[in-house]
């Protein structure tokens, strides 16, 4: 009996030493980057679905379980998760993944954000006090996020650190090759004007020197009004606007109305991994955005 107990103890120690760490991300794009760096060395899951509005995620019990079992939580940040993540964290009661702890990473802290409001007021819609939260749609920023994820994985899982470091090097090389192709294709759109439904793609447009001439939302999170759409129609009569950008969760009716009245083509863009069937990972997210703009 004593021998059997000893064997079980040794087995328990072995299993604990070789257990994979559990990584939880708030969005699928982060999960995809983690998979590029960690491969099969970690268990990784996302709280949100790529088809959802990233500002609103339903508080399902399964998400609480994920957070309760997590060793590392990686968030987008800039308070985009503020409306849904804190209640889930409270219910999960997992102290090691709270802000400031070793098992927490906020990717927004890596960058200087655009569109920081001078005045924070509900009168101006759903304003993000720290700036536009959709920084990840600038492809140049992805390697820096991958590096931060690698550093966090190495801190929590030291035995596999060299594995993560080698994967990061491979990813950076591959990403830069893709970036060269995207940059070349996007060159012809420099200086063009665009309308967009929500200020989702501003970082992408800024990177490729596309001017956002207006948004269908009069203020962030405020549905389009007829009077506001008429102003955009008037603008389009005296300015060349190349396209209207919108995401899968944006209502189509205002987009189709504006497109019909102006003759400007409306383009549905993926905003996250799995938002469209073709977008399976972080590479195809940008492949598909670039393809829809340039083909």
Image (cartoon, rainbow, N blue to C red):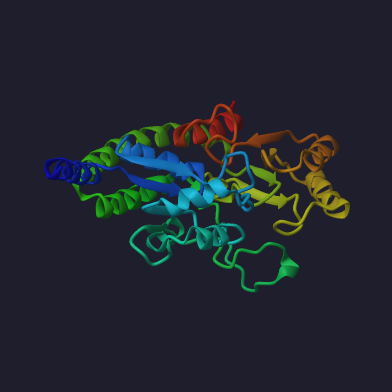
Q: In which quarter of the image is residue 125?
A: bottom right
Residue 149 in the image: above or below residue 219: above
Q: Residue 71 at x, y = what percent? A: 36, 53
Q: In which quarter of the image is residue 50?
A: top right
Question: For the C terminus, which image quadrant?
Answer: top right
- Indicate left or right for 238 with 121 as reference: right
Q: What's the residue at 55%, 27% (across, down)?
A: 278
Q: Residue 185 at x, y = what percent? A: 50, 31
Q: Residue 183 at x, y = what percent? A: 46, 37
Quick one: 4 or 183, which is closer to the camera?
4
Quick one: 159 or 284, which is closer to the camera?
159
- Indicate left or right for 163 with 176 as reference: left
Quick one: 200 or 260, which is closer to the camera?
200
Q: Residue 251 at x, y = what percent? A: 76, 42
Q: Which residue lies furthest to the bottom in this view?
A: 119
Q: Quadrant of residue 162?
A: top left
Q: How many labels does the image show?
A: 0
Question: For the N terminus, which image quadrant?
Answer: top left
């Amino acid at each position: 009996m004593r021998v059997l107990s000893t064997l079980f103890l040794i087995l328990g120690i072995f299993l604990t030493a070789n257990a994979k760490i559990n990584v939880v991300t708030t969005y699928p794009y982060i999960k995809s980057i983690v998979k590029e760096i960690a491969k099969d060395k970690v268990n990784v899951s996302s709280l949100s679905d790529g088809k959802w509005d990233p500002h609103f995620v339903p508080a399902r019990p399964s998400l609480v379980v994920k957070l309760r079992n997590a060793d590392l939580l990686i968030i987008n940040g800039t308070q985009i998760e503020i409306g849904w993540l804190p209640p889930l964290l409270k219910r999960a009661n997992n102290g090691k993944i709270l802000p400031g702890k070793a098992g927490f990473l906020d990717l927004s802290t890596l960058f200087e954000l655009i569109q920081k409001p001078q005045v924070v007021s509900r009168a101006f819609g759903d304003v993000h006090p720290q700036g536009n939260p959709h920084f990840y749609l600038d492809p140049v920023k992805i390697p820096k996020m991958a590096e931060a994820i690698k550093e966090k994985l190495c801190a929590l899982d030291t035995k596999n650190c060299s594995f993560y470091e080698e994967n990061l090097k491979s990813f950076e090389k591959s990403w830069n090759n893709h970036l060269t192709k995207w940059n070349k294709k996007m060159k012809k759109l420099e200086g063009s004007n665009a309308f967009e439904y929500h200020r989702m793609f501003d970082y992408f447009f800024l990177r490729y020197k596309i001017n956002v001439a207006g948004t269908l939302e009069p203020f962030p999170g405020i549905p389009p009004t007829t009077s506001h759409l008429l102003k955009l129609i008037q603008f389009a009569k005296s300015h060349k606007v190349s396209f209207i950008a919108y995401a899968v969760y944006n209502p189509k009716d205002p987009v189709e109305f504006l497109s019909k009245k102006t003759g400007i083509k409306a383009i549905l863009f993926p905003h996250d991994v799995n938002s469209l069937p073709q977008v399976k990972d972080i590479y195809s997210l940008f492949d598909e955005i670039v393809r829809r703009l340039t083909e």
